[in-house]
């Protein structure tokens, strides 16, 4: 009898031992999911990690990977998204998430493959996915070829093991945003509140006083007063020119009451507040009138230099997707209804952290434009909803991680950026940058070849004439048909070739006026005995990376071709576009063809006869030097191959008209460069 009772007890104990872990796992998953739904990702991570190790499921792997992504733990996110892709039935969007993380970890080839896989699995997103795949080539190129005139250093005096970012100039020092564990609040009481998203204290605005004119280890920090720092998040901020109005981001929770029946402790959206300094004391913060803390975020305020326009980021109705930049104007009696800054600035992804420099130039961070990875900093000129195409600041200003929170000093050549790039002290660090004027150089590299067989022609005399001074220098083409001249900045030139009795005289114009980048103007004289073919030389036409639309600055040069066609009967023009060897051959061929077609479409739209125009892209098939796939070449050598040629064919011998851009039979062509 005793043995039977003991047996029953042991069986029951065994069943209990078997069932209890399952119940515990179920309870743990529920607890983790509650943290996840409340954005308390760090708390959720601790549980999901154990669950994935003990009993892996798609739900756990997916949510853990997302938590790592949301908290910028890219190495762990990469490993966990790879795990997600091993489960049957996963959402194909994980290819996109995985590719984004791989790109941030500088694994560009793997990222490209996963972007393309995402394009195959979600056809309606294929255009965007292919663009992202091609952006990996730009990311690698920018990282491998950083701007040499920019120096970046970690600003140790600002940074801790926590997040420190978005400094602004303030009262002989700075205001910075940080979630560090500060010693005391202004009322001498420790704040022990922890933000579940990061596992760190809430963000606060700190005043950093610059002692002894140096930042390294000599910053005295103090919390901004309670009128500005609340119990939850505060910052980043923007301040008026006179230093008396401070605009800043605030966010928090509803702790003590429900809102329209909603649960307590819900996470509120971000809002903008402002405080006015009167008699040296900051006033109680007032809300920006277009906040909506229960429906959408309004954050990252940035004042224009005159204080009349406030730019900010928001996901309010009217966005193109994600967070967009908006602006509101101060009429003197209040702020106008916000207006979207427009599709030139905003994309289907996030545009955040605007900053307006003293000269009115806009800087912001974006995930939607072509980036190295994560958030990159871009610049644009204009105002309100009228902007130039944003320019990526490239490396070293940008990295493969998140780069944001830029601030310039008065000289417009030095300042700070914020980044969570590798090698920092904390999750986000402040870096000081300095730029020096580039050592610009300008030159002409030319070649003389026979039109019949493309063989080089030696001892052709080529002249370079300074149009302003009339100074003339000359050189002879060598055995390879090559010749070169050094050029001065802000100068107009004529390049002229004098040929023997078998060839016609030709010339073309080059200008370095307005050039802000070192440039090698590549001239090719393609000559023959008759007068049936010649090439039109134009100034450089630039394309934005991964785009083939004609920019405004290219239109004057295309209009010269249009004038020539309209003024000269019986000619046909072929538009020929080329790329360098970087990127895939198939993509380069497609891109060059699109660029040639865009030039053709512009001319047709402007009134050219379609029967007299053709276009063709040659990709990387007609390189002018040794810079093929795998060869290490300089920027200038690659630039030689990026060109668009306008070839005029089938001209009757009676033609004698020469338009004002100095075209004459057998004129040289400038090989037009793109920014790819």
Image (cartoon, helix red, strand yellow):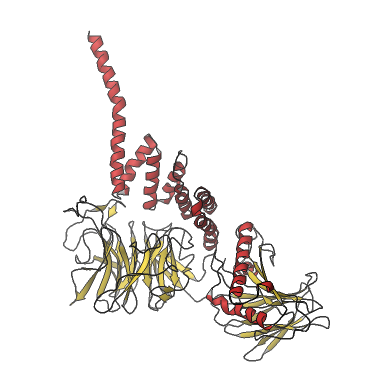
Task: Give 234 or 322, whichever is nearer the viewer.
Answer: 322
Find residue 503 and report its image quarter: bottom right
The furthest residue to the bottom: 469
Q: Position of residue 356 (x, y in %)?
A: 37, 73
* Count of marks placed on residues: 0
Whether residue 298 sits left or right of residue 637 in the image: it is left
Against 615, residue 536 (above or below) is below
Q: Quadrant of the C terminus?
A: bottom right
Q: Quadrant of residue 633?
A: bottom right
- Work out which quarter of the rendered image holds the N terminus and state it: top left
Q: Residue at x 53, y 68 (%)?
A: 544
Who is closer to the viewer here, 459 or 389?
A: 389
Q: Residue furthest top?
A: 1
Image side of residue 432 versus residue 661, left or right:
left
Would you identify the image quadrant in which residue 52 lies? Answer: top left
Residue 550 percent coordinates (x, y): 56, 72
Q: In this orientation, which residue lies closer to the viewer: 438 or 273?
A: 273
Give the percent coordinates (x, y) of residue 257: 16, 53
Residue 157 in view (yes/no): no
Residue 46 visible to the viewer: yes
Q: Position of residue 499 (x, y in %)?
A: 79, 82
Q: Residue at x 26, y 72 (%)?
A: 246
């Amino acid at each position: 009898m005793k043995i039977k009772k003991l047996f029953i007890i042991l069986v029951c104990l065994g069943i209990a031992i078997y069932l209890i872990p399952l119940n515990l796992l179920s309870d743990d998953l529920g607890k983790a999911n509650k943290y996840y739904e409340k954005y308390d990702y760090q708390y959720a991570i601790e549980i999901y990690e154990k669950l994935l190790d003990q009993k892996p499921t798609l739900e756990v792997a997916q949510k853990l990977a997302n938590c790592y992504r949301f908290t910028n733990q890219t190495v762990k996110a990469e490993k966990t998204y790879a795990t997600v892709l091993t489960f049957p039935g996963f959402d194909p969007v994980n290819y996109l998430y995985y590719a984004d993380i791989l790109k941030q970890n500088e694994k560009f080839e793997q990222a490209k493959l996963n972007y393309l896989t995402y394009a195959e699995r979600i056809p309606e997103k294929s255009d965007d996915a292919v663009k992202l795949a091609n952006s990996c080539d730009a990311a690698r190129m920018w990282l491998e070829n950083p701007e040499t005139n920019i120096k970046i250093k970690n600003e140790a005096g600002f940074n801790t093991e926590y997040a420190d970012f978005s400094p602004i100039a303030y009262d002989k020092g700075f205001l910075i945003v940080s979630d560090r564990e500060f010693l005391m609040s202004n009322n001498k009481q420790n704040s022990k509140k922890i933000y579940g998203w990061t596992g760190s204290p809430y963000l606060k605005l700190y005043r950093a006083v610059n002692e002894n004119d140096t930042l390294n280890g000599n910053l005295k920090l103090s919390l901004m007063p309670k009128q500005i720092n609340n119990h939850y998040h505060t910052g980043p901020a923007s301040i008026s020119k006179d230093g008396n109005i401070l605009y800043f981001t605030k966010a928090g929770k509803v702790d003590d009451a429900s809102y329209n029946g909603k649960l307590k402790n819900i996470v509120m959206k971000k809002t903008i507040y402002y405080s006015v300094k009167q008699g040296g004391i900051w006033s109680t913060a007032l809300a920006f009138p277009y906040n909506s803390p229960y429906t959408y975020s309004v954050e990252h305020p940035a004042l224009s230099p005159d204080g009349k326009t406030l730019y900010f980021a928001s996901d309010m109705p009217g966005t193109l997707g994600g967070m967009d930049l908006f602006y509101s104007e101060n009429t003197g009696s209040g702020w106008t209804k916000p207006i979207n800054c427009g599709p030139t600035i905003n994309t289907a992804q996030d545009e955040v952290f605007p900053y307006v420099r003293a000269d009115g130039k806009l800087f912001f961070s974006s995930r939607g434009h072509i980036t190295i990875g994560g958030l990159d900093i871009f610049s644009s000129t204009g105002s309100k909803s009228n902007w130039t195409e944003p320019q990526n600041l490239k490396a070293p200003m940008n990295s493969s991680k998140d780069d944001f929170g830029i601030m310039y000093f008065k000289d417009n050549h030095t300042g700070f950026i914020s980044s969570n790039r590798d090698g920092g002290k904390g999750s986000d660090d402040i870096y000081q940058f300095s730029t020096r004027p580039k050592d610009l150089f300008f030159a002409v590299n030319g070649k003389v070849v026979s039109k019949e067989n493309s063989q080089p022609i030696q001892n052709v005399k080529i002249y370079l004439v300074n149009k302003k001074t009339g100074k003339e220098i000359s050189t002879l083409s060598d055995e390879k048909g090559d010749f070169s001249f050094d050029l001065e900045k802000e100068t107009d030139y004529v390049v002229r070739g004098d040929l023997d009795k078998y060839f016609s005289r030709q010339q073309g114009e080059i200008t370095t006026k307005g050039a802000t980048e070192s440039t090698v103007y590549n001239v090719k004289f393609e000559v023959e005995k008759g007068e049936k073919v010649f090439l039109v030389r134009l100034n450089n036409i630039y394309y934005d990376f991964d785009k083939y639309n004609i920019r405004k600055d290219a239109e004057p040069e295309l209009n010269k071709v249009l004038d020539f066609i309209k003024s000269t009967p019986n000619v046909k023009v072929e538009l020929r576009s080329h790329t360098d060897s970087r990127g895939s051959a198939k993509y380069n061929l497609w891109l060059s063809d699109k660029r040639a077609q865009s030039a053709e479409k512009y001319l047709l739209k402007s009134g050219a006869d379609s029967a007299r125009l053709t276009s063709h892209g040659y990709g990387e098939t007609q390189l002018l030097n040794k810079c093929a796939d795998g060869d290490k070449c300089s920027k200038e050598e690659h630039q030689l191959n990026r060109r668009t040629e306008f070839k005029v064919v089938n001209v009757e011998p009676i033609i004698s008209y020469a338009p004002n851009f100095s075209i004459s039979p057998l004129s040289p062509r400038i090989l037009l460069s793109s920014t790819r």
